[in-house]
Amino acid sequence: MLGAAGVLSGTAVSADGTPIAYDRYGSGPAVVLVAGAMMERAHPTMAGLAEALAPWFTVFSYDRRGRGGSGDIAPYAVEREVEDLAAVIAAAGGSAKVFGGSSGAALALEAATRLPGVTELALWEPPYHVDDSAPPLPDDFAEQLAALVAAGRRDTVVERFMVEAAEVPAEAVAGMRAEPFWAAAEATAHTLAYEAAVMGPGNALPAARLAGIDRPALVLNGEDSPAWMRRAGAAVAAALPGAVHRVLEEQTHAVTVEALAPELLEFFVRG
């Protein structure tokens, strides 16, 4: 389906039969965008990034399993999300440069250990915990969130993820409950358990697995992001053979398209 401004919407079918909805922008070498927690392909950052790269690339921005227009066949496993990304890469022609943001960066890294079709990696602040300054998370955080979803306590799932994983002050989260977006956040609360599963027990850095990724990689952090996130970015870059680590001035974890797009363009064009 051809949408606004020449955006083509389509569906890839994952290995387990789950439909994965995507938007395709532009023309040129393929780039696939992997969103982080609580983001869909229509999110202003994801859509804006796709539009910014479209003059040079064919950009695929997709809804991860359980969100937006994509399906969610049970049971969940991180391997299924890798297969989802593989299906989008297949729709892109079989190989693609991949960008992942936050926990989406961790998914992109996991995919790169399994999928030869991932040719290059650009990563925004993969939130691994590499020292004691990171927020402590229980090793069974994913299981705890999944149990809360099963009990119908979706609001608690969103609150816990925001406070414990995203470091949003509890009082700020309490104020968010009255905002229009809260209902949408609750609707996709089950995917927050998926995010925790992608990050792994305690968000520990899988350095040995990353060492086997031999593709060009760019790891980006924000100058004004928490220090533990910057240290995590440096650690990821150190674990990836030949990766480049850069810190963007005046950027927080909620990076702007204007700051991010030029970095990705330079890296992907050079590659």
Image: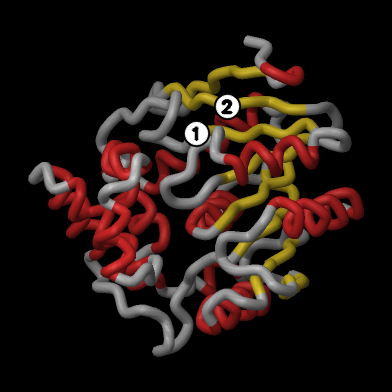
Residue at x-position 41% and y-position 45%:
79
Give the farthest residue toward the left. 151
Disc 1 secondary structure class: loop
Would residue 245 be seen by someone viewing this image from the given angle? no
Q: Which disc is residue 156 wearing?
A: none
Tell me whether circle 1 and circle 2 mark residues in contact (CB < 8 Å). yes
Q: Is residue 10 above or below residue 42?
A: above
**x then y, percent, for residue 23:** 62, 26
**x then y, percent, for residue 21:** 51, 24
On the picture, is 85 further left or further right than 161? right
| Residue carrying label 2 | 22
Which one is nearer the viewer's eye here, 215 or 264? 264
| Label located before the other in sequence (1 or 2) | 2
**x then y, percent, for residue 159:** 25, 58
- Mark 1 crowd level (few <14, some 14–19, many ≥20, 10 Å Cα): many
Look at label 2 and name its amino acid: Tyr
Which one is nearer the viewer's eye here, 6 or 176? 176
Residue at x-position 59% and y-position 31%:
88
